Image (spheres, rainbow, N blue to C red):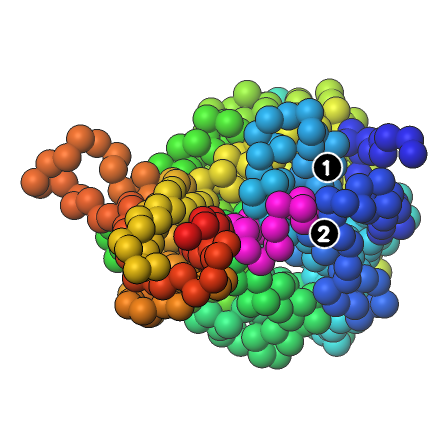
């Protein structure tokens, strides 16, 4: 069968994405399975790929790593990165030592495109910065106010600049195609108001009403601090079938030991919390997040930051109902949200602040504008065109094509972004707890009696409980060790022994100190007394951890 070739310098629509996933599943049936976890409102499947080597054990007996992408319609680079993860794991298996080891020892759960309806709409002209799913398409959920539309028919939904002496904007004196903020107290110039391109339903002739979309943000549809006041939160947690499918995947795979949710905004790696200051978080977990995040920064160039402290401009409006906080705060899973692509940094603008809704000053605006015009042309910036608006009168339509400038990189830069971020995913996956029976010894005591001793260790970086929060919430499952006898009777010690949690290497970040974090056991021992009842008797010891996998050893008596 020929090699599966996938172009990673372009963006794929639903049919192309489906074809690529099915081709990978057909080429590598021994390593992956492709299923659907939900059907969208518009009838599209939400594809789910599982990747592991079944010959090395059942998937649920291995640590799992979860990746999802494109929960927001406009974030096309995310599904490209998740598709790249599928392709990279499958094509590099047997050729790359780390990939081979991970696919043998672990399992990857990947949802390449959570939001196929929204993605299809946002990939199709007229290009529109929109993040909703298929419950409503833009405008279907509104009765009054401005409804974004391509009113000049150029295939792009951009902005309208409306002459207005009360306006906040003015033309840049050095480059009149861009607008800069009017200064406080400034008077006597030519000023503008900026609105999304579109028509106004039930316009009163005075106020341009712009309402948030009812349908828009499935990353507020999860059952943690859920609030109906959040933009796009849905009618109730998991009200959207795509989000419900995600939730079922996570809950049905309790072996998930790490997660990455992909987004696009600013080239950063977001960590919890979305609701708390760092000082309110568990100190061990905060240290763990920072250490793993430092690996991500080295591999991707993206800084790791607090969602609440550094990515929430208004602390009174913390984000509710998000995936990352749900899986960490409730289940203790270490989850990052990676925001791919930083237009400003690529254009040579020094990084100052992380949640930028637009350039911070005139010089930055000009620098970004120059890069976009040079590298993207009319696909990234639309020259202003006069238009006779039926409600607002003479306006101009144009400006930055947000979805193809700030939100997603040009295809020429896409593959490198995919590659570097997938490398971080693999390193995060490799940090999972890994349970092993280090030794299984049988000592003959006479009279067919034998002492069986098993030594069990966590060989991973993370503890078997993953996080301090998991222990606090009572959701961390203990490591168990079970003895099965074949031709022998167990005389002493229960057949299954709970060892509690086993620490990982992350706890020992420096040489021992009385004033530092105290070390917990990485290794524990269990002993049994058995009597052989026939020749050829044997015992099997199984060490099992929900997050750290299962390992078995057998010894004869």
Q: Residue at x 67, y 72 (%)?
A: 240
Q: Residue 346 is drawn in which quadrant?
A: top right
CA–CA distance in space, label 1 to label 2:
11 Å
Relative vertical location of residue 532 with respect to residue 385 in this rendering, above or below: below
x and y percentages locating residue 284 in the rendered image: 27, 49
Regarding residue 98, the answer to whether it shows in the image is yes
In the image, taking residue 288 as reference, residue 212 lies left or right, namely right
* Residue located beneath label 1 in the image: 90
Residue 53 lies in the magenta stretch: yes
- SS at badge 1: helix
Relative vertical location of residue 16 with respect to residue 488 in this rendering, above or below: above
Q: Earlier in the sequence, mark 1 or mark 2?
A: 2
Along the line of sight, the residue nearer the viewer: 432 or 383: 432
x and y percentages locating residue 432 in the rendered image: 45, 45
Magenta range is 51-66
x and y percentages locating residue 4 in the rendered image: 85, 34
Along the line of sight, the residue nearer the viewer: 460 or 261: 460
In the image, taking residue 405 as reference, residue 511 lies left or right, namely left
Furthest residue toward left = 514
* Residue located beneath label 2 in the image: 49
x and y percentages locating residue 7 in the rendered image: 82, 31
Q: Quadrant of the N terminus?
A: top right
In the image, taking residue 269 as reference, residue 50 lies left or right, namely right
Along the line of sight, the residue nearer the viewer: 92 or 439: 439
């Amino acid at each position: 069968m020929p090699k599966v070739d996938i172009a990673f310098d372009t963006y794929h629509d639903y049919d192309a994405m489906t074809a690529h996933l099915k081709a990978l599943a057909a080429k590598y049936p021994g390593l992956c399975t492709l299923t659907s976890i939900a059907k969208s409102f518009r009838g599209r499947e939400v594809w789910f790929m599982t990747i592991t080597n079944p010959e090395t054990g059942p998937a649920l007996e291995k640590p799992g790593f979860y990746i999802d992408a494109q929960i927001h319609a406009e974030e096309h680079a995310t599904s490209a990165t998740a598709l790249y993860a599928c392709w990279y794991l499958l094509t590099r298996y047997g050729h790359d030592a780390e990939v081979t080891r991970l696919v043998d020892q672990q399992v990857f759960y990947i949802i390449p495109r959570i939001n196929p309806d929204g993605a299809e709409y946002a990939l199709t002209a007229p290009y529109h910065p929109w993040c909703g799913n298929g419950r409503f398409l833009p405008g279907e959920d509104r009765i009054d106010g401005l409804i974004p539309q391509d009113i000049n028919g150029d295939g792009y939904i951009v902005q309208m600049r409306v002459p207005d002496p009360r306006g906040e904007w003015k033309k840049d004196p050095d480059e009149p195609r861009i607008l800069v903020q009017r200064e406080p107290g400034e008077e006597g110039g030519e000023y503008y108001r900026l609105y999304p391109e579109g028509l106004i339903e039930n316009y009163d002739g005075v106020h341009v009403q712009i309402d948030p979309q009812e349908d828009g943000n499935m990353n507020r549809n999860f059952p943690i601090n859920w609030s109906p006041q959040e933009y796009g939160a849905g009618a109730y947690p998991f009200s959207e079938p795509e989000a419900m499918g995600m939730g079922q995947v996570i809950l049905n795979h309790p072996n998930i030991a790490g997660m990455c949710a992909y987004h696009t905004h600013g080239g950063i790696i977001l960590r919890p919390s979305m609701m708390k200051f760092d000082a309110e978080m568990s100190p061990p977990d905060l240290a763990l997040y920072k250490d793993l995040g430092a690996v991500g920064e080295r591999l991707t160039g993206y800084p790791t930051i607090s969602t609440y402290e550094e990515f929430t401009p208004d602390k009174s409006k913390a984000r509710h109902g998000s995936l990352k906080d749900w899986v960490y705060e409730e289940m203790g899973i270490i989850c990052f949200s990676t925001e791919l692509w930083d237009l400003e940094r690529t254009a040579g603008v020094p990084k100052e602040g992380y949640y930028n809704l637009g350039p911070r000053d005139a010089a930055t605006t000009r620098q970004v504008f120059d890069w976009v015009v040079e590298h993207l042309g009319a696909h990234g910036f639309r020259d202003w065109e006069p238009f006779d608006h039926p409600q607002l009168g003479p306006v101009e339509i144009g400006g930055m094509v947000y979805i193809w400038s700030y939100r997603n990189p040009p295809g020429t830069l896409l593959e490198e972004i995919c590659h570097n971020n997938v490398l971080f995913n693999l390193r995060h996956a490799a940090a999972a707890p890994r349970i092993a029976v280090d030794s299984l010894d049988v000592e003959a005591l006479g009279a067919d009696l034998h002492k069986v001793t098993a030594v069990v260790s966590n060989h991973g970086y993370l503890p078997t409980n993953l996080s301090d929060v998991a222990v606090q919430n009572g959701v961390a499952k203990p490591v168990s060790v079970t003895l099965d006898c074949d031709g022998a009777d167990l005389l002493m010690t229960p057949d299954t022994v709970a060892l509690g949690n086993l620490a990982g290497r992350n706890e020992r970040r420096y040489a021992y100190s009385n004033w530092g974090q105290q070390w917990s056991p990485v290794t524990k021992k269990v002993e049994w007394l058995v009597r052989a009842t026939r020749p050829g008797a044997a015992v099997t010891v199984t060490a099992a951890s929900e997050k750290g996998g299962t390992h078995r050893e057998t010894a004869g008596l």
